[in-house]
Amino acid sequence: MKTKTILFLLIIVLALSSCTRDRQGRTVVSGMITGIPGSPVKFFELGPEHTVKLDSLALDADGKFVIKLDSGETGLYLLRTTRPTPLVLELSPGESVWISGPGLNFPEDIIIKGSAASIDLLDFFKASTVNSKKFDSLEHLLVSSQDEPGFAKLSGELDESLKPVWDKQKDLEINYIRKHPNSLTSLLVLNHGLGVSPLLTYRDDSVYFLKLDSSLGKAFPGNKHVVFHHKRIIQARAIEAIKKTR
């Protein structure tokens, strides 16, 4: 009788322990995206090299949705609607995030509650979009004017106009990294660019690569994003060493 009682109590303890672990590790992303009822919403994990779809659902009549995620480490995720640009989120185990706003202006006018890093990253992308539009417009004008008689003069003028936009975006990225040394979102910012060109390179800006390698290695030891970043630094160092021997 005592053996059965002890076994029963042990089962209860294990069940409660399991539930506690689930609650601690379960991340919940929920919200209300208005104006597009019934529209599909897809949720992806943004890995260092691959993107994996984790969930797919439809908004209800009020635009509400709930996504639950069990994860053992902090990661980067994408929330996609029918709009071309996804919402990027940094999520930690046990974190609850609420997302709301108009679906037709997703993700520009979305409000995030519960993830400070995700909020700041969205603000970064908004500011970057302004710079990117200016840069792309000037670059398009440059390319489309190649056959014009006065191209040489125009090219010099456009180059002068492009430089302030380039410098402004680079300052934006550097300031973000300085402010968020312990956030995985800084890795996205580090690799962000204008057009097809990254603004921060290991050759010219190694201080920021190494800064994140050190701070993120302490904040998230063993995290796949951090490990991948560290491997990139090793490769970059090797390339620079080879160049010096030539």
Image (spheres, helix red, strand yellow):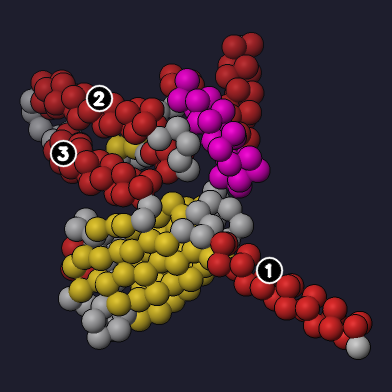
Q: In this view, does 198 lie above or below 33?
A: above
10 Å neighbourhood of mark 1: few (<14), some, or many (≥20)? few
Instruction: Note whether residue 24 is visible.
Output: yes
* Quarter of the view holding residue 127: top left
Separation (CA) of disc 2 from disc 1: 53 Å
At 88% from the left and 86% from the top, the residue drawn is 4
Q: Nearer the viewer, residue 97 or 167?
A: 97
Q: Earlier in the sequence, mark 1 or mark 3?
A: 1
x and y, in percent, of residue 204 in the image: 43, 19
Amino acid type for the residue under numbered disc 3: Lys
Amino acid type for the residue under numbered disc 2: Asp
Q: Is residue 85 magenta?
A: no
In the image, which is nearer the foreground, mark 2 or mark 1? 1
In the image, which is nearer the foreground, mark 2 or mark 3? 2
Separation (CA) of disc 2 from disc 3: 13 Å
Q: Earlier in the sequence, mark 2 or mark 3?
A: 3
Q: Which residue is denoted by mark 3 in the rendering?
A: 134
Image side of residue 77 versus residue 168, left or right? right
Q: Which residue is denoted by mark 1 in the rendering?
A: 17
**Quarter of the rendering occupied by the C terminus:** top right
Residues shaded magenta: 207-227
Q: Which residue is denoted by mark 2 in the rendering?
A: 167
x and y, in percent, of residue 142 in the image: 17, 34
Which residue in the rendered view is the most extreme toward the bottom?
1
